[in-house]
Image: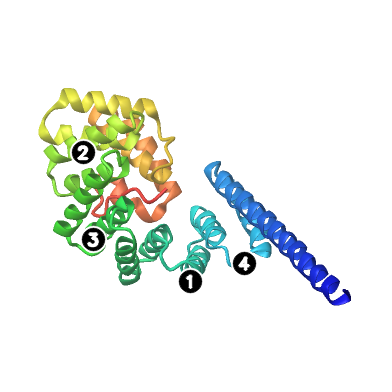
Amino acid sequence: MAVGFRRRFAACLSIVLCICEHGTAANHNETLKRLESQVNEAISHRNYEAAIRLADDGLHIASNSPELRFGRGLAYYRQNDIDTAIKDFDEAIRLQPRFPRAYVLRGYAYMLKSDDDKALADFNQAIRADPRNAAAYCDRADLEDSHLRRPENALADYDQAIRLLPSFQRAYFNRGVHFFSRHDYKHAIADFSRALQLMPTDLDSYAYRAYAYAKQGDRAQAFADARRAAQLGAMGDSLPRSVNLANRARAYRVLGQGEAALRDLREAVRLTPERSAPIDNLSVPRNIPRRSPP
C-alpha cells in the first residue's frame, strides 16, 4: 500500500514539475520575443541607444539569442560603430550559421572598412544560404562595381536583384548610378525614373536624372528635374547629407543658379572636408555613392 502511494506521489510530482518547467519556458520565450520586438521597434524609430539597452537586457536573459545579437549589431551599424557591429554579427552567425541578413550586413560593414575579400565572402555566403535574397545580390553588385572594378558582374547582380524583387527601389537607384558612372545616360534615366515611381520624393534620383538629361541635351527635362530636386531640399537620409547637398548643387548648376550651388557645396565641404576635391568643381566623383542597406 505504502509502495503504491509513493509511486503515485512520485508520478504526480513529476507531472507538476513538468508543467512548471513548461510554464517557465513559455514565459521565458514570451519575454524574449517581446524584447526582440521592442529592439526592432526602437530601431525602426531610429532610437538606437534604446535598442542597444533593450538588447543588453535581453542578452542577460538569453545570451544565445541570435536575433538579439543581430538587433544590437544593427543598432551599432546604424550608429556607424562598425567594429562593434561586426562583433555582434559574428556572434549572431556563430549562433545561427544560416542567417542571410547577418551575412549581408556584416558584408556591407566589411565593405565600409574596405575589407573587400571578407565582404565578398559574406555576400556569397548570404546568397548560398538564401538564393532568393535580393539584398545580397544588390550589395555584392555594389562591391563589384565600386571596389572590385567588375562592372559586368555588378550589372548581372543588379539585374538578378531586380528580377527577384521588382519593387526594389535601392537596386534601381544603384543600377542607375552604375549606368550613370559609365556615361550610359539612357539606361541611367530609365532606372532613376523607375526609382522615382517607387519613391516619388527621392531627391537623389531627381538630381542624377537632371544631370543625365542635361548630358543628353534635353534641357527642358533637366530643368524640371533640377527644380524638383531643389524643392525637395537636402533632407533625405538615404545618402549622407553631404552627398545630398552635392547632388542638389548639381541640380542648381543645371538651373544656372550658381550662388545656390556654391552655398550647398560649401556646406557639403564643411560636413566632409575629405570630399572637397571632387565636390568643389561639381564633377561626378569616380566612386559615386550607392545606397547601403537600410
- Lower position in the chain sequence, tag 1 or tag 2: 1
Please name which of the two marks, 4 or 2, marks the residue nearer to the observer.
Answer: 4
Q: Residue at x 50, y 62 (%)?
A: 85
Please name which of the two marks, 4 or 3, marks the residue nearer to the observer.
Answer: 4
**Amino acid on which the number 1 mark rests in the picture:** Arg
Residue under pointer 2? 191
**Amino acid on which the number 4 mark rests in the picture:** Ser
Residue 248 in picture, x, y percent from top left:
33, 35
The label shown at residue 94 is 1
Circle 3 sits in a helix, a strand or a loop, which is it?
helix
Residues marked 4 and 2 touching at CB (< 8 Å): no
Dot 1 crowding, Cα within 10 Å, few <14, some 14–19, many 20+: few
Q: Is residue 175 toward the left or the right of residue 23 in the image?
A: left
Circle 1 sits in a helix, a strand or a loop, which is it?
helix
The label shown at residue 144 is 3
Q: Dividing the picture into quarters, in which one does residue 20 lie?
A: bottom right
Q: How many marks?
A: 4
Most distant residue in the right direction = 2
* Gap between marks 4 and 2 measured at Cα: 44 Å
Residue under pointer 4? 63
Q: Is residue 10 toward the left or the right of residue 211 in the image?
A: right
